[in-house]
Image: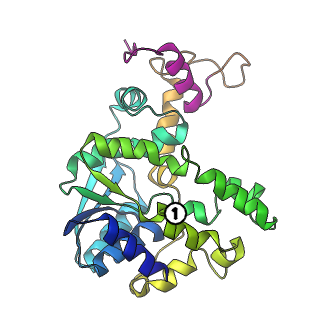
Amino acid sequence: MIDKLLQQEIDKSSSDKEVAVLLSGGVDSLSVAFAAQRLSKKITAYTFKLKDVDNYDSDKAIEVSKLFNWNYKLIEVPTDNLVEDFFKLLNEIKCERKTHFECCFPFLYVYPQIEQKEVLSGWAADGYYGVSKKALIHYTKDKPDTRFKEFRSKYFAYKNRAGYVWHNRVAEKYNKKFITPYLTNNVKNFFWNKTWEELNKPFQKHTVVNAFEEFKKFKFKKHINLQLGSGVDKLFESLLQNSKVNPLAGNSHNDKKFKYKNITAIAQYWNKKGKGTNLYDIS
């Protein structure tokens, strides 16, 4: 059923014959690509890796693209412009939290390479399953179903949804239409009526995997968050020691006066300093 729902939602949102798909090695983006293919869309898969960093997702995206005869493009994201990119995300995209910066950063380089107008993605689908470390500890495994519902309500709140608002700003910056079938009401209702056990047993995301015969043609791993699997999280940690970004860089993390221990705190500092202006002093 979920395969038909995804097809219906893509059909309603997408009018172009040729579409881009932000493809990783995970079930979510692959299922969206399969649904689009069933609609006879001509797919070009876009995937990325940081320069000189191995990335399972990009390798798997290329493997599957070849298997299904999709066009594909691998974008190598440079890491030597990180300070400038941080302030671009802060000032132009208005990123506020650590995950906003990390999940938007690679797409500053991906979107300029996308030739198609419509960009399909499995964005935010992970939230339906409650398999993050935080979810497993506090909301899902061996917890009442009401806690799972609470987790998902928070996850899919307007300013959450895996940072959809900020990613969409990047897409709009490059004049693209960002299509996210997993965030539509019909798909949301499908998942909302299922318990954590129903969605994750006998294995994670089995409902989607079993709905698409295409998954039987290749092997895949459990998906990991975009920023973790690509190494973007570690890259952004380096900014904590950069004096242009972190005004207290160089202080020990054990020092109580060290206020800015993460990107979220640093963003709050700059947003407060730059309130009412679009200029940030990085000299």
Residue 229: where, in percent of width, then height?
A: 48, 55
Name the secondary structure under disc 1.
helix
Question: On the image, numbered disc 1 is attached to which residue?
Answer: 125
Front-most of residues 216 and 241: 216
Which residue occupies 25% across, 43% down?
Answer: 174
Q: Does 194 appear above or below 166? A: below
**Residue numbers of the magenta segment:** 260-283
Which residue occupies 48% across, 16% down?
Answer: 275
Residue 211: where, in percent of width, then height?
A: 48, 84
Residue 278: where, in percent of width, then height?
A: 37, 18
For the question of whether residue 62 can be seen, the reply is: yes
Determine whether, in the image, residue 144 is placed left or right of residue 114: right
Which residue occupies 41% across, 66% down?
Answer: 29
Count of labels in the image: 1
Q: Is residue 50 magenta?
A: no
**Mark 1 neighbour density, 10 Å: few (under 14) some (14–19) many (20 or more):** many
Determine whether, in the image, residue 227 is placed left or right of residue 279: right
Quarter holding the C terminus is top left
Q: Residue 178's image quarter?
A: bottom left
Front-most of residues 43 and 224: 43
Residue 68: where, in percent of width, then height?
A: 27, 79
Front-most of residues 190 and 247: 190
| Disc 1 residue type (three-letter) | Ala
Determine whether, in the image, residue 251 is placed left or right of residue 246: right
Q: Does 41 appear above or below 98? A: below
